[in-house]
Each structure stands twice: as structure tokens, then as C-alpha cells.
Amino acid sequence: MSRWKGALALAGVRWAWKRYRRRHEPPPSPIRQNTELLAWGATGAALGVGASALSERRRTRRMRGKVVLVTGGSRGLGLQLAREFGASGASVVICARGREGLDRAVAELTGRGVDAHGVPCDVGDPEAVDALLDAAVERFGRLDVVVNSAGTMRVGPQETMSDEHFAQAMDIMFWGPFHLSRAAAERMRGTGGTIVNVTSIGAYLSVPHLLPYSVAKRAWAALSEGLAAETGGTGVRVLTVVPGLMRTGSHKGVVFSGDPEREYAWFALAAGSPLLSVSAERAARSIVHATASGRGFLIISPVTRIGLAVHGVAPGFTQRALRVVGRLLPGAPDMAMERLGSQAADSRVGRLVDTVAVLNERAGRRMNQRSRAGDGGARDGDTGTAQTGGATDAAYDPELTGSRVPEDEGGPAPDE
């Protein structure tokens, strides 16, 4: 409201001054009138921008002395959120499954002057969630904000997805936020606090070749909005965040099934397009500001807002449009394969795509992501798992290991 108060005050002063001048001076010439109008317009614009900037600074300062817990905080959007909350003055607890990547992230945050602490945790385990909350309170004496930003993603035709793949997505992107949100809400009841759930446009528009992801995200969004409705009067606020595509570089950690190289091509191009995606830095700043200002619902990008609006007004139209998109995407081959994005990127098609999607490649380096096959990056030497979120699942990758392997954590997927 501060920006509108400044504008209204300016308008009132201008009106009073004009009334005074009309009584004591002859009418000004047209040129003088235009000059005066331009001067007032420039002054009003400057005051409006200044009021907005001061308002955002005051909102950010509200995080000083707060304690924020971020899941999936060792890379990607989770790491960037930890940076932004820390820059706003908050103490930060990050959790992830892999100790090495977690320690690296904590060291980086500490180097930036952030009071940070890392806790290894699998948020799919209710007992581990309780221990995580206890560790945060034990370290800093309080807990004010819990951010659910962990996620996992597989890309490919639904024919190549097993029941286990759907179960894994639900474990990370529904049961994880479910356990953590409910436990945090109970602890914050009466004392106050905020739960931030980073969902996705995929929760509202089920994009072809992302079916397990969209199913889990839709359940997560329903959980978030339902908790927001039921925590009224308890002192607990719930912020539901709906991003679109984001440039986090996590496409290298996604598992692509069916025709991996072609699946990687369309996905990487979309995730790295400046017209369709936003930077992780911009998304993180928006989330921190929304948290500090007490908002309940946040849509990150204009493209996402347009997509949700069109779907709300004409769901049949969006369904038909997505059917067309589905027909344009690669079909399921007779011999379906499965590869990490970092492997698919080493193909001729992958290298060509990466030269075009250079913004996402740069984002991956900033967000502590793996860059190429064989590059351990921030993945702590894991061997072929699909992780784009925080506390993770174990993935089956016959191309690499022929067995299930425990998975490290990562930053949220490009469209979380």
C-alpha cells in the first residue's frame, strides 16, 4: 500500500498547488502546461518506484532474525532460496540426502556470510522429518519458515513409466511435503510461522511426458491449498508457489525414457528458453518477498499466469492443445531406453541443443548442478539416478548400473 499512499499524497499536493495558482496567476501557455505535465509525470514515476523499492526492502528486512528450513537445499532452486533468505538476514537450515553435496552447499553459504547449517534427511521418512525439525530448533532456538522445494522428475511417454515411478514421485512430492508440512504446522501452532510449498504449473496443467511429476504435483498443490484453508486462526500461514519453467540447470539430472536423446532435446530447449522460462534468481527473490509480505499464493511468471487463466476459462481448449503437443513429442519406441540428461547431453543432438540452451547451462554451473556424464558435479559421485529435488528417491537406471542405487539430492526441476 505504501506506493499508493505516496502517489495519492503527490496528487493531493498537485491539486492544491493548481488551485492556488489559478487564483493568483493568469492561465499558462500550452507549452508550459505540457512541460509541467511531463515534470509531474516524471516526479510521480520516481516517487512510485522509490516507494515500491522501500516497501520491498522493508518486507525483506522482516526476515532478519528468522530461521528458515529449506529442503533440497544443496543445489538448484533450493540452494538459491537458501542464498536469498540468508541475504535477507535469516539463519538457514538446509537438508538433503547426500552429505558431501550438503557440506559443499553449507560452505558456500557460510562464505557468503549466511549463518547456515546442514542436516542430512530423507523427507519421505516421518521419523527423519521430526529429527530434522528438532535439529533446526536445537541449532537456532526457533523455526519460522519451512520451505518444501524438493522434487524429482522423469520425462518420457507414459508407456515407459512403471507403477514404481509413480510411487517414487508421490514419495518425494506428496508424502515428503505432507509429513513435513503437518509436523511443522503442529509445532508452529500458536507461535506463528510460514510453510512455503513450491508446486508447479504441472499441478494445474498436466503436460505430456511428465505424467508422474504432474500427478504428484497436483496432490501437493491440493495439500498446500487445503492446509492454507485449515490453518486459519492458528498463527500458521501457508504460501503456495506456482512457478513455470525455471532455469536451474537440473535437466542434466532428469531421467529420460523412451528415446532419451529426442526427449532431452525438447525438454532442454523449453527449460532454457528465455521466452518460456525465468531465472532461478528471479524466482527465489519472488518467493522470499512473498514469504516476508505474508502472501498466500504466488505465480512466478507471466507465461504461467496466462496458462492458468486460459485453463480456468477454457479447460477444454487447453486439453485439446496439450493433445496436439503430445502428438508432436517423441513416441515410445519398441526398445525403450533410459538415460540421465547428463548422458543424453553427450550425444550429437544433445551437444547441439546445449549450444542453443546456453542460459540453462550457465544456470547449472551457478546452481551446483552436474554438467556432463562422468562429471560428479554436486551429485557426490552417484551413479545414474534421476534427482531434481531435495531428499530423494532411489532410481533404476539399467543403462548405468542395472540395479537400484541410493540417490543424492538435487535442486528442483526446471519447472518447479
Image (cartoon, grey):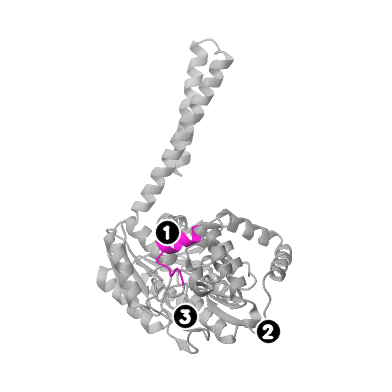
Residue at numbered disc 3: 384
Q: Nearer the viewer, mark 3 or mark 1?
A: 3
Disc 2 to disc 1, C-alpha distance? 48 Å
Q: Nearer the viewer, mark 2 or mark 1?
A: 2
Q: Which residues are magenta?
A: 359-372
Q: Residues within 10 Å of mark 2 (few under 14, many from 20)?
A: few
- Residue 291: which disc? 1
Instruction: Give 129 or 276, whichever is nearer the viewer.
Output: 276
In the picture, residue 319 is in which quadrant?
Answer: bottom right
Q: Secondary structure at mark 3?
A: loop
Q: Secondary structure at mark 1?
A: helix
The answer to which of marks 3 and 1 sits earlier in the sequence is 1
Amino acid under disc 3 = Gly
Q: Count the marks: how many?
A: 3
Query: What residue is at 55 percent from the left and 76 percent from the top?
Result: 216
Q: Is residue 70 left or right of residue 416?
A: left
- Residue 334: which disc? 2
Amino acid under disc 1 = Thr
The answer to which of marks 3 and 2 sits earlier in the sequence is 2
Instruction: Give 127 or 186, whichever is nearer the viewer.
Output: 127
Query: What residue is at 27 percent from the left and 58 percent from the top?
Result: 113
In the picture, residue 142 is in which quadrant?
Answer: bottom left
Disc 3 to disc 1, C-alpha distance? 35 Å
